[in-house]
Amino acid sequence: MRRIQLNVSIGLIGLDTSHVEIFTKLLHEHPHEYSNAKVTIGTPYPSFDLEISRDRVEGYTTTLKNKYNVTIADSIKKVAEKSDAMMITSVDGRKHLEIFKQVVHYQKPIFIDKPLAMSVWEAEEIFSLSEEYRTPIMSSSSLRYADSLVKLLQAKEERPTGVYLKGPLPFIRQMPYYFWYGVHMIEMLLTIMGTSFKSISIQANEQFDVITTEFLDGRFGTIYGDRHWHGKFEAFIHFGNETIHLPIYRDEKPYYAGLLDNVIPFFISGKSPISKEEMLSVLRFVEEASEKRDKISR
């Protein structure tokens, strides 16, 4: 794989999520914080059966073109050819494997926005292709890199004895249950507690979902999800006799900036800060929890 240096040219595939505007704004307004990496090209690639894609793609495409001088390409191929690294930012997780198959042979680093895929099988296919073509990949929710969470976990030598997470958990039909927004708190849970979960139980009604997880060592973690969207992610993390409250939504540094702090070095080095096993563990949790939630709904 060809290693890239500074002044990274980034191509976006899928301009139908707020993430594309946020990433572009951060990179263009704070270039020296991100090795002068910039979004230079993108292609819309909307899903017309998905309202949040169909209704938003034009606005985000126009903003990237007119405000940030991003070249709008009419094909994925042009984005792959004209960039040093790519971000699959399509909001529709059903398309991620399909898109990846079209760009993996370019052997350029690829960040796949959440969700990595819509099944563990699809994710394993993505990793198999990445290994075949020696194309490095990374996938992560931005909440993994929330500033207050990162600082707390770095400061603490002891591991947490438990966690309670609270935040938004809306659903959409095309990406059922936890594949869309549930990824955020699930990834936070496994970042805090580790990936060795033993069992998952679900309680739910029309307003809230409660996901309780037992880990192999006997510790527990709980996610309390509000089905109505809001931006107030919070964590209560237990350490022995101490419980620390993190109102993540009050962090001065955006968690998207924390994500880019890790994505840009990945683009330069080709080495993901998150292992394949951990990325797969997140999706295994999402898939198992979603299957159990589906049984409740029947």
Image: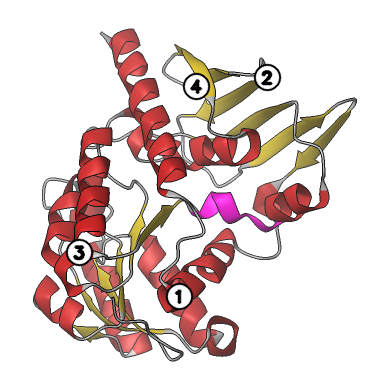
**Residue 183 on image: x %, y %:** 43, 39
What residue do we see at 45% from left, 29% from top? 227
Name the image quarter holding residue 174: top left
| Residue contact between numbered discs 3 and 1, judged by CB atoms under 8 Å | no
Alpha carbons under labels 4 and 3: distance apart: 43 Å
Q: Earlier in the sequence, mark 4 or mark 3?
A: 3
Name the residue that disc number 1 marks: 269
Q: Can the viewer see residue 85? A: yes
Alpha carbons under labels 3 and 2: distance apart: 39 Å
Residue 193 is tagged as none
Alpha carbons under labels 2 and 1: distance apart: 36 Å
What residue do we see at 51% from left, 69% from top? 260
**Residue 279 on image: x %, y %:** 42, 44
| Residue contact between numbered discs 4 and 1, judged by CB atoms under 8 Å | no
Instruction: Note whether 37 is above or below 242 in the view shown.
Output: below
Name the residue that disc number 4 marks: 208
> Magenta residues, as a range?
142-147
